Amino acid sequence: MTVDMIVNAFVTIIVMFDPPGLAAIFLGLTTGMTRSQRIQVALRGTVTAAGILTVFAIAGASLLGLLGISLGAFRIAGGILLFWIAFEMIFEKRHERQEKSAERAVTKDHISNVSVFPLAIPLIAGPGAISAVILLAGSFYAPVERAGLIGVILAASLVLFAFLVIAERIDQFLGDTGRTILTRLLGVILAALSVQFVVDGIKQAFVTV
């Protein structure tokens, strides 16, 4: 486990979380709540999502093995999925889709449950984040390394929690233009990371063959 691996994992997870974009959606989900209530929702949502991602970091590779899916194949498929998410971030499609999911959830569920759905699932621990964690777990083999990955998940979740707590200030500071620019920059970074996952998957598939 190297510093580069840790940094790459942290950047990948943070980009998947998209804190600036999620902060704006979080404000919409918690409209009418007090600051203390928002903090409770943010804490419960991030803890729940971190727990889900930790489970996939530990057992994701084993699950692939049970399904007979090689890590190389999953790297390719996961890389393509992450590239699609990056495409949506760059062209503002992901934010629109998340807003629609959030609106549907608020109408169907009581406001006290928004921390679990849709905040924790699928806005934070969605298919993209879960795929990214399983992909990263493939590079963290030893128990100590896997513990390091879990530490990265917790650190990224802590950063996201901080963003949600000060969501109102961030939204006022960035505005629509600033948030759009930052989300698109994160999308470009994710696109590069996803291509690297595909390249690594192809290499691994050829080595296996």
Image (spheres, helix red, strand yellow):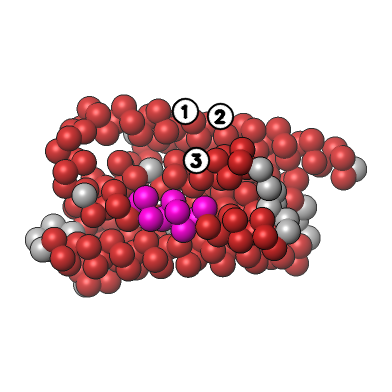
Q: Secondary structure at mark 1?
A: helix
Q: Mark 1: which amino acid?
A: Val
The residue sitting at 76% across, 62% down in the picture is 65
- Could you tell me how far apart the alpha carbons at marks 2 and 3 are, in whole angstroms? 12 Å
Given this view, does label 1 or label 3 mark the residue nearer the observer?
3
User: In the depicted view, which residue is nearer to us: 84 or 178?
Assistant: 178
- Density class for disc 2 (Cα within 10 Å; few <14, some 14-19, many ≥20) is some
User: In the depicted view, which residue is nearer to us: 149 or 168?
Assistant: 149
Q: Which secondary structure class fits the magenta region best?
A: helix
Measured as percent of width and height from the top left, residue 205 is found at 81, 41
| Disc 3 target residue | 11
- Label located before the other in sequence (1 or 3): 3
| Disc 1 target residue | 188
- Label located before the other in sequence (2 or 3): 3
Report the side of 139 relative to 87 (left or right).
right
Marks 1 and 2: in contact by CB < 8 Å?
yes
On residue 40, the disc is none
Q: Quadrant of the C terminus?
A: top right
The span shown in magenta is 152-160
Marks 3 and 1: in contact by CB < 8 Å?
no
Q: Mark 2: which amino acid?
A: Ala
In the rendered image of this protein, does residue 4 appear above or below residue 51?
Answer: above
Q: Secondary structure at mark 3?
A: helix
On residue 192, the disc is 2
Measured as percent of width and height from the top left, residue 19 is found at 34, 45
- Could you tell me how far apart the alpha carbons at marks 2 and 1 are, in whole angstroms? 6 Å
User: In the depicted view, which residue is nearer to us: 22 or 127?
Assistant: 22
